[in-house]
Image: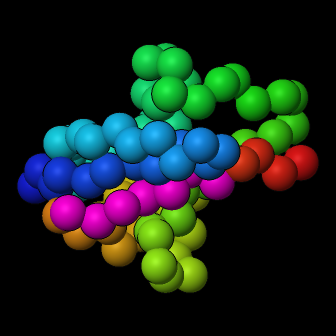
Amino acid sequence: MAEISVTFLHPINAAEKPATLPDSITADRMINELIAIGFVTEPKPNEKYSLKIKETDILISGVETLADGGAKDGCLIRVIIPIS
């Protein structure tokens, strides 16, 4: 398990949240962590956030790990607004 340093971007105001974490963390777990620290709000029922590597079309969602989704050290990851 390797660690990577990434920066998460807020879906509305583009606020930044740098983080160093295991590249094996899943998108769902990371989103739950971002909710827990108040970076993003709890989505409505039947809605779900996704993560997107900035300046690419790569979406990381669900049980996919950041590494499997293509996240690399130093990348920017945008939190995508929940879609029903």
Q: What predominant SS class does the magenta segment belong to?
A: strand
Above or below — where is 9 with respect to 66? above
Q: Is residue 82 left or right of residue 71?
A: right
The image shows residue 59 at horizontal and vertical percentages of 56, 69
Picture quarter containing residue 48?
A: top right
Name the residue at 52% across, 19% down: 38
Q: Nearer the viewer, residue 25 or 83?
A: 83
Above or below — where is 84 with respect to 32? below
Q: Is residue 6 visible?
A: yes
Residue 78 lies within the magenta run: yes
Name the residue at 32% across, 50% down: 7
User: What residue range appears in magenta?
Assistant: 74-80
Residue placed furthest toward the bottom: 56
Name the residue at 66% across, 25% down: 41
Above or below — where is 37 with respect to 6? above
The image shows residue 1 at horizontal and vertical percentages of 12, 52
Q: Is residue 13 left or right of residue 5?
A: right
The image shows residue 84 at horizontal and vertical percentages of 89, 48
Q: Nearer the viewer, residue 26 or 10?
A: 10
Name the residue at 44% across, 27% down: 33
Q: Is residue 63 visible?
A: no
Residue 31 lies within the magenta run: no
Q: Is residue 81 left or right of residue 52?
A: right
Count of all numbered marks drawn on residues in the image: 0
What colouring style does the render use?
Answer: rainbow
